[in-house]
Amino acid sequence: DEAVGLLRAQCMDPYAEVKVLACQTMESFCYNHTQLLLHFCEPMGRGLMSCLVHQHAKLRIAGLRAMTAVLLTGQWKHSHEVVQHMVAWQDPNSVPIKAFYETVTRVNYFSSLDFDRHPAVRRFWYETLVHWLIALPDKVDHEPHIFPHLLTGLADENDEISLELFWLIEKLGENYELDPEHEKEIRDQKQYGWDQGWTYSGRAHIPFP
């Protein structure tokens, strides 16, 4: 508990070099103690948020690396809460009492990174999202929040980034077909020649953006 609190405080330090070192330390700490940090996933994830919107590109990338390690500690339980916080999701059936009396502001960190001013950060951001959808055991919980942002990247102003993302999404499709959980579904589609509804019976063709 004390170690986690110290790392969180360092990640929120006003000095950039301290934050970078804290992100690297938290990344190593999470990878080496994954099984022991289940209930610390959300606090550590929230502690990294200031790094994701910092003015230094190097720090934003370090924050994403640390976030990947943090999400591994709370798989199937708390990691989804971190992702929901990053997309500013609010349960419509659970409104804080505070919201009735004053303005409550939420930051969509996913959108901030989608339109980051530095191409290297955007590239690493989209690669990180794809890595989450491939490597995280509980990726099925995150898919509804992540895929809309991957589609945003297809229209990135940098052609190299949009093209790379196109092939990364292709890789996600290949992984989906190889997943044993979807074997019967894929086999039926191939054997019976079913077309998805959005293809209008196979007549629709969507060009690359």
Image: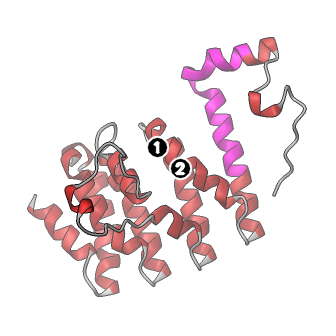
Mark 2–mark 1 CB contact (< 8 Å)? yes
Give neighbour class at mark 1: few <14, some 14-19, many 20+ (Cα, 10 Å): some
Is residue 58 within the magenta segment?
Answer: no
Q: Is residue 59 above or below residue 33?
A: below
Q: Is residue 92 above or below residue 113?
A: above
User: Magenta span covers which residues?
Assistant: 167-188
The quarter of the rendered structure image containing the N terminus is bottom left
Report, in whole angstroms, how far the alpha carbon at label 2 lies from the one at label 1: 6 Å
Residue furthest out toward the right: 203
Give neighbour class at mark 2: few <14, some 14-19, many 20+ (Cα, 10 Å): some
Q: Which mark is residue 146?
A: 2
Counting every numbered tag in the picture gives 2
Q: Residue at x 39, y 51 (%)?
A: 84
Q: Say which amino acid is labelled 2.
A: Ile
Residue furthest out toward the front: 101
The quarter of the rendered structure image containing the C terminus is bottom right
Q: Residue at x 35, y 46 (%)?
A: 91
